[in-house]
């Protein structure tokens, strides 16, 4: 049996990584056992993601039509499920993400070679820059060849000028580490330049050809801003 995700690429789900469960690090195996009571039914884990703008081009009409509260998640799950049913009918699987299970997506992304750390706290890799995301994670009872790790050094390790640091109006990266509270408080300001985007992320030159367009940036960042506003509003009421 061969792993053939090519038809998903046409729908913008162009990142794929197959892992053997028994070869995963102990901490990831423990996390999976904690969120899946029937883990013994499966032999592998498949991580799907998107890089660049292609997925957005498919999802944007659904967003405009208001067909789902989480149109990107819905679309991604539907495409993966349809592909799986057509290509591997009857082969058991279980979707862990999107969902409530606390799965270690970034750890899996690092194992796949997709995810390296960045000063602005968004995963980055040499091919896509920071313009990629995790879309679906599922357990499968399959015996595919595990996917080779994506080759590429951490881009930030060789970056001398660090334009992301100087571009951040909140100075969230000016000291050691990342000043999350400074970032959030700046985003919450009515006249913030980062309400619907991250200027630090946009300043990064890695994978610039894959940078999201204005509509996609605004969609993601305004959704995250609403979540931040709701969190701080609730905290203020409870204090």
Image: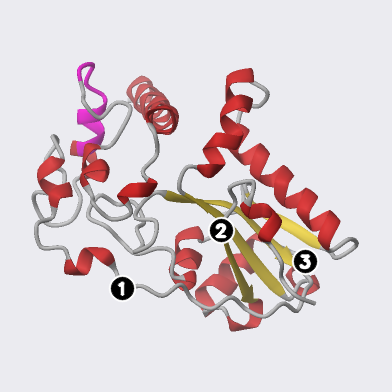
Q: Residue furthest top?
A: 190
Q: Residue 28 in the image: x percent, y percent?
A: 54, 71
The type of colouring in the image is secondary structure
Helix, strand or loop status at disc 2: loop
For marks 2 and 1, the one nearer the N-term is 2
Residue on which the image places disc 3: 38
Q: Note whether 134 is above or below 21 in the view shown.
A: above
For marks 3 and 1, the one nearer the N-term is 3
Q: Magenta segment, which residues?
A: 183-191
Q: Note whether 59 is above or below 51 in the view shown.
A: above
Q: Residue 64 in the image: x percent, y percent?
A: 58, 20
Residue on which the image places disc 1: 153
Q: Residue at x 62, y 66 (%)?
A: 32
Q: Quadrant of the C terminus?
A: top left
Helix, strand or loop status at disc 1: loop
Q: Quadrant of the N terminus?
A: bottom right
Q: Residue 229 in the image: x percent, y percent?
A: 36, 24
Q: Is residue 125 left or right of residue 57?
A: left
Residue on which the image places disc 2: 103
Q: Is residue 198 magenta?
A: no
Q: Residue at x 89, y 61 (%)?
A: 89
Mark 2 or mark 1, whichever is nearer to me:
1
Question: What is the spatial separation of the Cα atoms under label 2 and label 1, in whole angstroms?
Answer: 25 Å
Q: Is residue 186 magenta?
A: yes
Q: Note whether 70 is above or below 13 in the view shown.
A: above
Q: Note whether 138 is above or below 97 in the view shown.
A: below
| Mark 2 burial class by Cα count in 10 Å: few <14, some 14-19, many 20+ | some
Q: Residue at x 39, y 26 (%)?
A: 222
Q: Residue 201 in the image: x percent, y percent?
A: 27, 44
For marks 2 and 3, the one nearer the N-term is 3
């Amino acid at each position: 049996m061969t792993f053939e995700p090519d038809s998903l690429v046409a729908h913008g789900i162009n990142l794929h990584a197959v892992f053997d469960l028994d070869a995963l690090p102990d901490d990831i195996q423990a996390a999976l056992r904690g969120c899946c009571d029937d883990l013994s039914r499966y032999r592998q884990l498949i991580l799907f993601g998107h890089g660049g703008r292609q997925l957005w081009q498919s999802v944007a009409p659904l967003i405009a039509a208001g067909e789902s509260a989480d149109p990107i998640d819905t679309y991604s799950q539907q495409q993966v499920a349809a592909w799986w049913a057509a290509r591997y009918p009857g082969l058991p699987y279980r979707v862990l993400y999107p969902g409530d299970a606390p799965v270690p997506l970034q750890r899996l992304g690092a194992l796949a070679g997709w995810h390296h750390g960045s000063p602005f706290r968004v995963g980055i890799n040499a091919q896509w820059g920071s313009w990629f995301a995790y879309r679906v994670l599922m357990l499968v009872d399959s015996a595919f060849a595990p996917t080779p790790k994506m080759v590429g050094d951490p881009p930030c390790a060789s970056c001398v000028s660090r334009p992301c640091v100087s571009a951040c109006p909140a100075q969230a990266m000016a000291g050691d580490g990342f000043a999350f509270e400074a970032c959030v408080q700046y985003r919450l300001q009515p006249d913030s330049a980062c309400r619907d985007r991250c200027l630090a992320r946009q300043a990064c030159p890695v994978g610039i050809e894959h940078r999201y367009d204005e509509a996609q940036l605004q969609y993601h960042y305004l959704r995250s801003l609403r979540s931040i506003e709701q969190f701080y509003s609730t905290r203020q009421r409870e204090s």
